[in-house]
Image: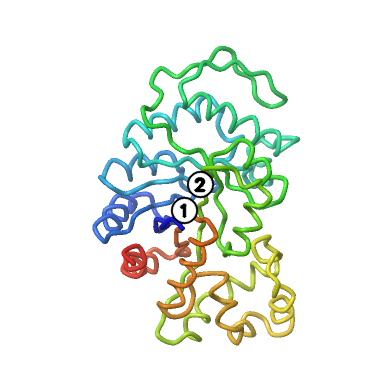
Amino acid sequence: MARARVGLCFDRTFPAVELPAYARQLEAAGVEQLWLIEDCFYTAGVSLAAAALAVTDRLDVGIGIMPAVARNPAIAAMEIATLANLAPGRFVAGIGHGVQEWMGQMGARTPSPLTTLDETVTVVKRLVAGEEVSFSGREVTLDAVQLDQPPAIVPKVVAGVQQQKSLALAGRVADGVILVEGAGPTYVDWALEQAGRPDDFHVVTFTMMAVADDRREAYGFVAPFVAGLIAERRPAFTVLPFFDEMHARVERGGADALIDMPADHWIEIGAIGTMDDALAHVAALEAAGVHSINVFPGDDLDDALAQVPTVAAIAGR
C-alpha cells in the first residue's frame, strides 16, 4: 500500500489575488499538494497554477479540471508543457467533460462529450510527450503539430470523470482519474473496476473534511452539503451499500437526520469526525489505491485557511 500525498484545494470562488499567499502557507505548513478548481466562469486554472508554482519550491500543483472543449488541444498541450517546464515533476493536468450547460453557454457544447474527451486526452498526451501529431477525429483535427519545448519530465494527464463509460475511457487513454468529493474507498474500488485497473494509474480524490473533538459537531458542519450530494444521487454515493438508508434519512428528516448515521458511514464518505476518524478515512483510501488525497475546503477562504493545520497534520501522519 503506497502512502498517499495530501493536499488542499483552492475553491473557484476564492479571489485570485489570495493564491500566492495561500500556496506559500500550504508549503510552509507541510501540506504536500494544491489543487486548483477551474469551473466556468470563475478563476482560470492555468494562470493560477503558474502563480502557485512560481512562489513555491516543493508543493505539487494540479488543475481539476480543464474542460476538454474550452481550449484547442494544441493550446492545452502548450500550456501543460509550459507549466511542467516551470516546475519539473510538480504539475498534474486534469481534463474532463466540463458541465455541458456551461459549454453550451459559450458555444462549445459537443455532440459527443465522450468522443471529445477521448480525442483530447489522446492528442494532448502525445503532444506533451514530444511527438509530432497529425490527427483526424470526429471532434479534434491536427496537422503535423509538434511542441517546440516538450517537458523533460512529462506530467500526468488525468481525467476528471464520474460515470461508468467515462471511467472506462479514462482507463484506456488517461494517466489516472480525479474523483470528486464524496469518493470513498468503496467508490474508488468501483471506479478502478470500471477503468479496467490499468497499471500505473494515478488516482486523485477531492475529499470532504470536518474534524472536531465531538463527532456530532463535525457531522453537523458537513451534513447539509452531504444531503445535497445524496439528493442528486452522486455516483460516489449510489454505489454504497447503505445509500438507500442515507437517502431515506434525507427524505424523512433532511440534513439533520444524517447526524445520527453510524461513524463508519461517515468515515466512508469523508475525513469526517474526530482526528482518528479522518486518519481512518485516509488509510482506507490508501488501501483502495488512492495516490493523492485533497481536502475540498468549501467556499469560505477563512474556513479553508483554518483547516491548513489539520491538513498538514494528516500529511505528516
Q: Earlier in the sequence, mark 2 or mark 1?
A: 2
Q: Which residue shows up at 57% across the image and 64% down it?
A: 185
In the picture, measured across the screen, residue 124 lies left or right of residue 113, that is left
Eyeballing the image, is 15 above or below 69? below
Q: Position of residue 8 (x, y in %)?
A: 40, 58
Residue 246 appears at what percent x and percent y?
Answer: 69, 77
Colour scheme = rainbow
User: What's the residue type where badge 1 is placed?
Assistant: His
Q: Which residue is mark 2?
A: 202
**Does residue 309 appear left or right of residue 296 in this picture?**
left
- How would you rate the neighbour count of disc 1 (Cα within 10 Å): few for under 14, some for 14-19, many for 20 or more? many
**Amino acid beneath label 2:** His
Q: As displayed, is residue 93 above or below residue 182? A: above
Q: Is residue 219 left or right of residue 150?
A: right
The numbered mark at residue 140 is none
In x, y percent, where is residue 29? 26, 61
In the rendered structure, find residue 291 and report the number of the disc placed on it: 1
Placement of the C terminus among the 4 image quadrants:
bottom left
Dots 2, 1 in contact, CB < 8 A: yes
Query: Which residue is found at the position 51% from the left and 38% from the top?
Result: 157
Secondary structure under tag 2 reads: strand
**Where is residue 32, by image quadrant?**
bottom left
145 or 290, which lies in front? Answer: 290
Looking at this view, name the residue that lies furthest to the front: 1
